[in-house]
Amino acid sequence: MRHGKKVNHLSRQAGHRKSMLANMACSLIEHKRINTTVAKAKALKQFVEPLVTKSKEDTTHNRRIVFSYLRNKYAVTELFREVAAKVGDRPGGYTRIIKLGNRLGDNADMAMIELVDFNELYNGGKKEVKKATTRRGRAKKAETTTEAPAATPEAPAADATETTEATE
């Protein structure tokens, strides 16, 4: 009996399942989103989330652990450089599954799985870049903002006199 065992076997033997999930994870890391069936997307989510968590701390040991799962140097490098930089402050939930409907050939439930921080539609089209801030920088910034509004009223008045001269 298989009571209490959460692994979805996906109608495959262990070696085939691990290879398929590793290949799908490499594709997800490279392309940031892939289309697959709902069952495979859920299995992939369980496979990828711990790897992304490990990538947040860039150590040789973590790289070797992730490489033992993915078996692709390019995917490991991309995960530790690009993906980890974007999801550094997120405490889990790195992927999103969106259901797409049924496939035409066999009517299978299809879904799109994507990395959350790489979708510009949900992020409002802006790329977030963290800056190191200090207390000293805030004081200088406040001084420049108080001076800037005083200088702006003079410029439109000069433009208004030029436009009246041009009309005459």
Image: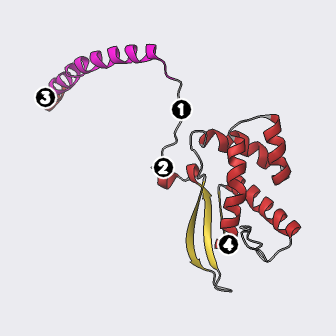
The mark nearer the N terminus, 1 or 2, is: 2
The mark nearer the N terminus, 1 or 4, is: 4
| Residue 9 percent across, percent down from the top left | 77, 72
- The CA distance from mark 3 to mark 4 is 71 Å
**Of helix, strand and loop, which one carries label 4?**
helix
**Of helix, strand and loop, which one carries label 2?**
helix
| Residue at the spot of label 3 | 164
Give the residue displayed 15% in from the left and 24% down from the top. Answer: 161
Number of the front mark, 1 or 3: 1
| Residue 112 percent across, percent down from the top left | 61, 66
| Residue at the spot of label 4 | 39
The mark nearer the N terminus, 2 or 3, is: 2
Q: Are marks 2 and 4 in contact (CB under 8 Å)?
A: no
| Residue at the spot of label 2 | 123
| Residue at the spot of label 1 | 130
Give the residue displayed 40% in from the left and 18% down from the top. Answer: 138
Label annotation for residue 84: none
Most extreme residue toward the left is 168
Q: What amino acid is at disc 1?
A: Lys
- The CA distance from mark 2 to mark 4 is 27 Å
Q: Provide the residue span drawn in magenta.
A: 133-161
